Image (cartoon, rainbow, N blue to C red):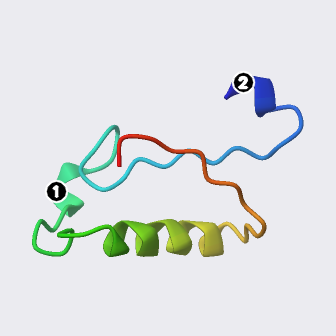
Amino acid sequence: MPAFADAYRIVLLDHRGSGAADSSALGLCHYLNLHPYADDLADVLAHLDVSGAVLVGHSM
């Protein structure tokens, strides 16, 4: 990630219940497939007014 920081805006996201995210916010019944995770990502990008983003991810 540091190699891109000078040229790009970097947004790091921990999904609900992982990393530094609040595990009490994880609704297990809600996250049975990838659609709710995609919705969360879209909400974050909209909140930050990000357009034309490139997603680099792993472990999904």
Q: Picture quarter containing residue 2?
A: top right
Q: Is residue 7 above or below residue 48?
A: above
Q: Secondary structure at mark 1?
A: helix
Q: Residue at x 30, y 56 (%)?
A: 16
User: Which numbered disc flags the more N-terminal residue, 2 or 1?
Assistant: 2
| Residue 18 percent across, percent down from the top left | 28, 44
Q: Do the numbered discs 2 and 1 sit on residues whose CB atoms are within 8 Å?
A: no
Q: Residue at x 78, y 66 (%)?
A: 52
Q: Is residue 24 left or right of residue 48?
A: left
Q: Which residue is mark 1?
A: 24
Quadrant of the drawing holding the N terminus: top right
Q: Amino acid at mark 2?
A: Pro
Q: Which residue is mark 2?
A: 2
Q: Kindly give the residue lying farthest to the top in the view shown.
A: 3
Q: Amino acid at mark 1?
A: Ser
| Residue 36 percent across, percent down from the top left | 33, 73
Q: Residue at x 41, y 47 (%)?
A: 14
Q: Secondary structure at mark 2?
A: helix
In the image, which is nearer the foreground, mark 2 or mark 1? 2
| Residue 9 percent across, percent down from the top left | 78, 47
Q: Picture quarter containing residue 32?
A: bottom left
Q: Residues within 10 Å of mark 1 (few under 14, many from 20)?
A: few
Q: Residues within 10 Å of mark 2 (few under 14, many from 20)?
A: few
Q: Which mark is residue 32?
A: none
Q: Kindly give the residue lying farthest to the left in the view shown.
A: 29
Q: Is residue 14 left or right of residue 28?
A: right
Q: Is residue 13 left or right of residue 52?
A: left
Q: Residue at x 62, y 67 (%)?
A: 45
Q: Is residue 53 above or below residue 7?
A: below
Q: Picture quarter containing residue 53?
A: bottom right
| Residue 40 percent across, percent down from the top left | 43, 69
